[in-house]
Image (cartoon, rainbow, N blue to C red):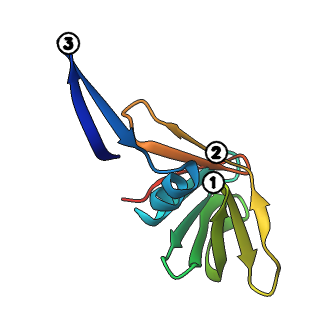
C-alpha cells in the first residue's frame, strides 16, 4: 500500500491510500516465493509433490516428484520419478494465464485465501498451493 496523502479532520486521522490493483497483487504474490502442493495416497502409499516457481521475465518452471514404496507377499516395490516443465505466464485484469511448452495461453481459475496461521494459499483450478519451505 502506498500512502499519498493524509489529513487530520477533527480528532481523527484520515489516510488516503493508493492500493495496488488485484492484478498487481496476484502478480507480486506469485513472484514472492516458489509454490508447492503435496498429495499422499494412503491406499497405494504413493506421494506426489509439485513445485512451481514464477520468474519476473514471464517464465515459470514446474518440478514434479513422485515416489512410493509397498511390500507384500509378492515382494517389495519402490519407485521414484522426477520431471520438469517450463512455460510462460502473465496476469491480465486479475486473471492468471499459463502457456505450457508449445501451447497457447489458457486462463487459470485462481483464488487466494489464507490458512489458519494467516499464510497465503493459492487455489489454482481446484489445487491448493502453499509457500514452499
User: 3 and 62: which one is in front?
Assistant: 3
Q: Is residue 121 visible?
A: yes
Work out how far the residue at label 2 is from the one at label 1, CA to CA, in angstroms.
Answer: 5 Å
User: 124 and 65: which one is in front?
Assistant: 124
The answer to whether 69 is drawn above or below residue 6 in the figure is: below
Q: On the image, numbered disc 3 is attached to which residue?
A: 10
The reply to whether callout 2 and callout 3 are in contact (CB within 8 Å) is no
The answer to whether 91 is drawn above or below residue 43 in the figure is: below
- Where residue 80 appears, x then y in whole percent? 60, 75
Say whether residue 10 is left or right of residue 107: left
- Where residue 11 appears, x then y in whole percent? 17, 12
Please tell me whether mark 3 sits on a helix, a strand or a loop: loop
- Where residue 56 appears, x then y in whole percent? 48, 77
Residue found at the very far top of the displayed protein: 11
The circle on residue 125 is none
- Label 1 Cα crowd, 10 Å radius (few <14 / some 14-19 / many 20+): few
At x 58%, y 71%, the residue is 65
Q: On the image, numbered disc 1 is attached to which residue?
A: 45
Work out how far the residue at label 3 is from the one at label 1, CA to CA, in angstroms.
Answer: 65 Å
The reply to whether callout 3 and callout 1 are in contact (CB within 8 Å) is no
Work out how far the residue at label 2 is from the one at label 3, CA to CA, in angstroms.
Answer: 63 Å
The reply to whether callout 2 and callout 1 are in contact (CB within 8 Å) is yes
Which image quarter: residue 68?
bottom right
Mark 3 / mark 1, whichever is N-terminal: 3
User: On the rendered image, what quadrant is the C terminus found in?
Assistant: bottom left
Q: On the image, numbered disc 2 is attached to which residue?
A: 42
Which image quarter: residue 104?
bottom right
Please tell me whether mark 2 sits on a helix, a strand or a loop: loop
- Where residue 67 appears, x then y in whole percent? 59, 67
Amino acid at each position: 500500500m502506498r500512502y499519498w496523502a493524509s489529513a487530520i479532520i477533527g480528532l481523527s486521522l484520515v489516510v488516503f491510500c493508493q492500493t495496488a490493483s488485484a492484478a498487481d497483487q496476484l502478480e507480486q504474490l506469485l513472484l514472492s516465493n516458489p509454490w508447492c502442493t503435496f498429495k499422499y495416497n494412503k491406499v497405494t502409499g504413493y506421494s506426489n509433490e509439485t513445485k512451481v516457481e514464477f520468474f519476473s521475465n514471464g517464465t515459470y518452471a514446474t518440478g514434479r516428484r513422485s515416489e512410493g514404496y509397498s511390500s507384500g507377499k509378492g515382494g517389495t516395490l519402490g519407485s521414484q520419478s522426477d520431471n520438469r516443465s517450463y512455460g510462460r505466464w502473465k496476469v491480465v485484469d486479475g486473471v492468471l494465464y499459463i502457456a505450457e511448452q508449445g501451447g497457447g495461453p489458457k486462463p487459470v481459475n485462481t483464488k487466494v485465501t489464507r490458512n489458519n496461521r494467516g499464510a497465503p494459499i493459492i487455489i489454482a483450478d481446484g489445487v491448493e498451493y502453499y509457500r514452499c519451505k
